[in-house]
Amino acid sequence: MESFLYQATIYLAAAVIAVPLSARLGLGSVLGYLAAGLIIGPILGLVGDETADLQHVAEFGVVMMLFLIGLELEPRALWDMRDKLLGLGGLQVGVSTLAIMVVAMVAGHPWSVALAVGLTLSLSSTAIVLQTLSEKGLMQTNGGRATFSVLLTQDIAVIPILALLPLLASVPGLAELTPDGSINLLHDDEKGAHDLSLVEGLPGWAVTLVTIGAVGFVVLAGIYLTRPLFRFIHASRLREMYTALALVIVVGISFLMTLVGLSPALGAFLAGVVLANSEFRHELESDLEPFKGLLLGLFFITVGAGIDVGFFFADPLDLIGLALLVILFKGVILYVVGRAFRLKGRDRWLFTLGLAQAGEFGFVLLAFSTQQNVIPAHLSQKLLMIIALTMLITPLLFILYEVLSRRIREHVADMVPDEIDEQGPVIIAGIGRFGQIVNRLVTASGFKTIVLDHDMETIQTMRRFGVKGFLGDPTRPELLKAAGLAKAQVLVAALDDDAQVTKLVAYARRQRPDLHIIARARDRNHVYELYRAGANDIVREMFDSSVRAGRYVLENVGLSEYEAAQAAQTFYHHDRKAVRDLAEVWDPNVPTAENRAYVERSQALQKDLETALMELNEELASRRSA
């Protein structure tokens, strides 16, 4: 007991210290877990032989992760994304695997080992890349969406890869086909003679039927049994029973898959997809997410603790060189694939540099490949080092992307602007989700609009729906001149990029002091920038929808529809006035929370709002009583 408590304290303390620090440095949680394992393992020697046994338990976090991935992927959503998943993602995984496999075979490895290496290194780091894309606001760019599609394809590809790897084993470890056509499972000393199996000794046709039956049972159980089970658990009114049921679903399905010789991860993923449309999906996610996070974190810690530091320092230049070679090799492939799918400029470089590393699934596949005698232990250790090094280099790749992005002039290098042969009273710069709604309302009311956007795909999509738009950078003076800026009555600045919106507003105000400018803002700080740049009306993209949602809340907690509308209107007008007042004391060079005048003015305005709403409530109450 004392030993268990000691080890648990060491592992948890290492994670609590290293992971937040790594996240603060922008390196991601995965690298934090790896660093924690390195520190408590090979560096300080606080953990020892129990790491390997603990890793077997922690690997169940991978199964949970794939179940949760399945929950996020409705069958219809998968079908809608089939072009990018099979095309962009499938091509990247396939070409990278084959290319790395050829290099490995040239280096003298057998084809089975080379294929396993290619599959392992073809995958990228979902955890690091998605976190970085979100932090830097790149998820909604064309490059970000393409990168996400490939990462999703790679996550799904892990399932068939896990099923394929045992078939590449150089030493039999799972099963053999006997002369009579039956399946004979082979056991090593660790498995012993008491393993359970539903297919051992069965002829091949029976194995197929049993396997299909097991998969069919998972699908049917997910459709027809989960609702009665959840209703039964709900009747107990015990919150912990929901968690127990979620664990039973994942553990039970994983066990069933092992009985028929399939990967537990395959069954968990399949169950997740089946339950994606269930009303209990969010309940399952919330119950399993903490277990998944802790077990995956524990898995990465054990991987870090198992790294042989002496192995690295025996030949550091060779390992660093191989890691850079993997990044370069994958980068070339990604660049070509991105070019084939017409990614341009910044988007292509984001796609290339963002996915050039190996990923955390590589650790999973390496551990599994070594257990199944596919990849030799000494090669696995070397690949482990290479994957870890490529992940450590990833933050530098995103820094390189930012440098390249600043130097790329999209409108010169990547697109030829349309010749604008029309002018109108309303110019709409940006035809994304925001600009589309504005354009539909204005045109449906009988007014002509001139639509400008720098994204070729967006313009082409809108043209299919009968909306005429012109391709070009709306911040370019000559494009605005051709669109009729000199005679226009209204300019709507609805671009996605905050800096571009501010730049457009400032230029238009200098050219036309009398022009009415309506600008889209992301947040309050952006509102203040646009206010100083000269915008007449500034619309925060989430403000109106949030006020409407707040009004619905008031209607459902006791206020009448009229009373809720009056409260929402009072809040709306007060906020508009407050923003104008706060803009006078806002300083772009001082963080908002450290601007004393801003904070004091904000607090005073909040009290004014509370007073105004209180007076409104009293007035409404007096009307009701009268």
Image (cartoon, rainbow, N blue to C red):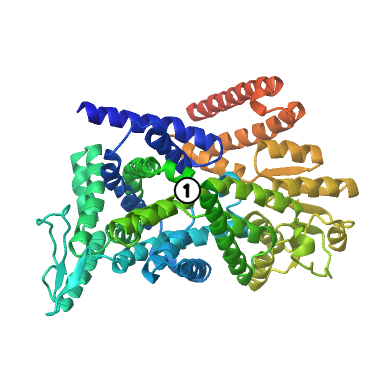
x and y, in percent, of residue 127 in the image: 47, 48
* Residue 361 drawn above or below residue 212: above
> Residue flagged by tag 1: what amino acid is it?
Ala
Viewer-nearest residue: 607 or 242:
242
- Outermost residue on the front side: it is 314
Identified at 52% across, 39% down, the residue is 550
Report which residue position mark 1 lands on: 388
Mark 1 crowd level (few <14, some 14–19, many ≥20, 10 Å Cα): many
x and y, in percent, of residue 291 in the image: 32, 42
Viewer-nearest residue: 544 or 401:
401
**Quadrant (top left, top right, bottom left, bottom right) of the N terminus:** top left
x and y, in percent, of residue 183 in the image: 15, 72
Viewer-nearest residue: 529 or 385:
385
Identified at 80% across, 54% down, the residue is 475
Asked if residue 598 can be seen in this view, the reply is yes
x and y, in percent, of residue 371 in the image: 28, 56
How many labels, in total?
A: 1
